[in-house]
Image (cartoon, rainbow, N blue to C red):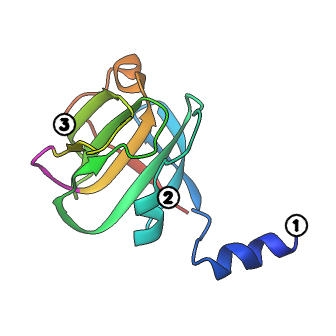
Amino acid sequence: MIAFFPLLVSALGCSTPKQSSVRFEKHRFLVELATTPDQRARGMMFRQNMDEDKGMLFIFDEEEVQPFWMKNTYIYLDIIWIDRSRKVVFISRNTPPCTEEPYRSINPGKKAMYVLELRGGTADKIGLDVGDELILDIN
């Protein structure tokens, strides 16, 4: 069964996100990279929990306004929009999961090249604010 799993994932058009790390000054996070449309669409759906030092980094092809929603997401998240120069432009803190349709979209109205999702409360815990710089260590 284990040998079959990669074939099943491939056949379904899914791909396992790569992992890398990012940091804000001394606060480092191991992140899954969501770089394909399928990975970005799935995002953190169906996750029941997230460790304090983990997250997901969405990487877009173009810097533009990137609305997000919390469809099928079961945990509170800090959603952090980051521009091309890797500066934080907007933070949605402790964003609650959506429990019913229509799903509310979070639209910061700011252009972003990256969006980072961390466990809810993390931005406050590390003192993250607009203008802070994200340091990428992408493999």
Position above or below: 127 against 10? above
Residues rendered magenta in the picture: 108-112
Whole-percent x, y for residue 139 in the image: 56, 63
Q: Which residue carries the number 3 mark? A: 131
Question: Is-magenta flag for residue 69?
Answer: no
Height in image: 25 above or below 35?
A: above
CB under 8 Å between callouts 3 and 1? Answer: no
Q: Which residue is drawn at 33% across and 39% down?
A: 79
Q: Which residue does the numbered mark 1 point to in the structure image?
A: 2
Q: How many discs mark residues in the rendered view?
A: 3
Q: Is label 2 in a helix, a strand or a loop?
A: strand
- Name the residue rendered at 66%, 82% in the picture: 11
Please tell me the numbered disc located at residue 33.
Answer: 2
- Give percent across and percent down for residue 92: 26, 33
The answer to whether the residues at label 3 and label 2 have Cβ atoms under 8 Å apart is no
Q: Residues within 10 Å of mark 2 (few under 14, many from 20)?
A: many
- Disc 3 to disc 2, how far (Cα)? 22 Å
Q: Is residue 83 left or right of residue 32?
A: left
